[in-house]
Structures are given as C-alpha cells and as structure tokens.
Image: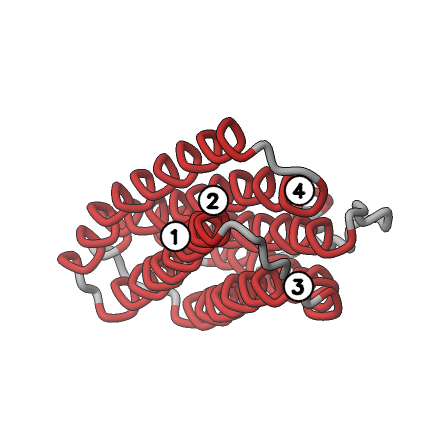
Amino acid sequence: MTDHTVASFDEELNEMRSKVVQMANIVNTQLQNSLTALQDRNSELAEKVRLTDQLLDDLDSDVERSAVEFIARRAPVAVDLREIIAIIRISNTLERIGDYAKNFAKRLDVLLETDSIRSSERLLSHMVDITSKMVTDVIDAYIRRDIDLALEIWHRDQEIDAIYNTMFRELLTYMMEHPHYITTATHMLFIAKNIERAGDHATNIAEMAYYIATGKALDMERPKKDKSHLAAAPDVEE
C-alpha cells in the first residue's frame, strides 16, 4: 500500500477503507442473524436485520460521496485512482449483499409460521457460513493486496453453487412428495438463491481486489456450478 507525502491523503483513503471494513462486518452479522432467526424461530431478530439494513445504505452513500469528493480534490492517478473507483464498487456490492440478507429476513414472516425442513436448513446454514467467510476473506485480500487469496475466493464460489444445486433438487423433490410443504419449500428456494447471489457478489469483490493489486482484470472465465436452470422435475415413487 502506497504512503503519500501529504498525510491527509492517506488519512482520507484509510477512512474510506475503514468504512468498507465496517460494512463487511455488518453484512456478516446480517447474514448470520438471518440464519439464527430462522433456526431459533426468532421474529424479533429477523426484524432487527430488516431495520439494520438502513445503516448499510447510509454507509454506502457516505463512501460514495467521500470517494467522489476525493477524486475532485486530490486528482488521484494510477493505483490510487484504481482503488478509489474500486472502493465505490466494493461499497455498492456490500450494500447489495446486505439487501440479500434483508430479503432473507423478510421471508421469515412466513417461514416462522410454518413447519421447518431441517435438511434444507442445514444446507442453507452451510451456504451462509461459506458466504460470510468469503466476505471476511475478500475484504482482507483487498486491504492486504493479497492476489493469491483473491483468486482462492474467486474459485470458492463453486462450493456455494454446488450446495445450492443440491438444495434446489432436494426441495423440488420435497414439494412433490409433501405438497403441504410447498409454501415453506418455495420460500427456502428464494432464500437459497439470495445467498447464492451473495456469493456471486463476494466473487465480484475478489475480482476488484485482484484489479486493485495488479492493474489487470481477471481474464479467466468465472467458475460457475449453478445448474438449477437445467434441472428437470425429479421422479417420485408412487
């Protein structure tokens, strides 16, 4: 990370970096609280997630405003300009992941009034844990300019896709075998898709971290394993 002769230049950069780290911490809390609210049937915790989303929106606006003012006043170039532009995108992306956590919590209004599908909840828990770790690690990769970690996270998204595919097939089968669970299963599918998309967004941040560190965009095809759009209805035994 470059040190500049004008101390206030670094101070302003560090303040924006700190807000991005703060946003990542809030996002992870939001994801884990949504999962806990589902597992513990805790409607108050779900409501807390929905209300906390405004804090992420405000931080995102603060980061974007600070970055635009920084560009106007400091006229950064090279790696500094790359980072400032990426900071705006990272902040926007974290805010979007927060929206997915909020959407998760909103669906609990219905799910907490229905019987649970424990096997799918376990798969969802695994998805959330992987996604949260990706968010933590990708911000670390960005701050430390760790190219290897950014690439490792970029590939890690396949794990989430694989679990999502398993959960998708399982819930389709469950709906066919147990029609009275269709409402529960449908909401679980939407939640799982939200978490899968959150993983995609963490992967986007990995690409930004790589770009900041190298000045080059990743030119490899993103490894995706989400095959749910190809799934056929499973056979059900009579």
Label 4: how many residues lie within 10 Å, few (<14), some (14-19) or many (20+)?
some
Answer with left or right where residue 148 lies relative to residue 3.
Answer: right
**Which tag, 3 or 1, sits closer to the chain's start?**
1
**Mark 2 = which residue?**
91
Label 1: how many residues lie within 10 Å, few (<14), some (14-19) or many (20+)?
some
Identity of the residue drawn at 41% across and 67% down:
121
Q: Give the camera-side residue of 55 and 164.
A: 55
**Which tag, 2 or 3, sits closer to the chain's start?**
2
Q: Considering the numbered disc 3 on the image, is that residue within a helix, a strand or a loop?
A: loop
**Which tag, 2 or 1, sits closer to the chain's start?**
1
Specify the quadrant that holds the C terminus: bottom right
Q: Are marks 4 and 2 in contact (CB under 8 Å)?
A: no
Single out the residue that lies furthest toward the front: 5
| Distance from Cα at disc 3 to Cα at disc 1 | 17 Å
**Mark 3 = which residue?**
145
Q: Give the camera-side residue of 75 and 52.
A: 75
Q: Are marks 2 and 1 in contact (CB under 8 Å)?
A: yes
Amino acid identity at mark 1: Lys
Amino acid identity at mark 2: Ser
**Which tag, 3 or 4, sits closer to the chain's start?**
4
Q: Nearer the viewer, mark 2 or mark 3?
A: 3
**Mark 4 = which residue?**
82
| Distance from Cα at disc 2 to Cα at disc 3 | 17 Å
Q: Give the camera-side residue of 88 and 229.
A: 88
Q: How many marks?
A: 4
**Mark 1 = which residue?**
19
Amino acid identity at mark 3: Arg
| Picture quadrant where residue 84 is located | top right
Specify the quadrant that holds the N terminus: bottom right
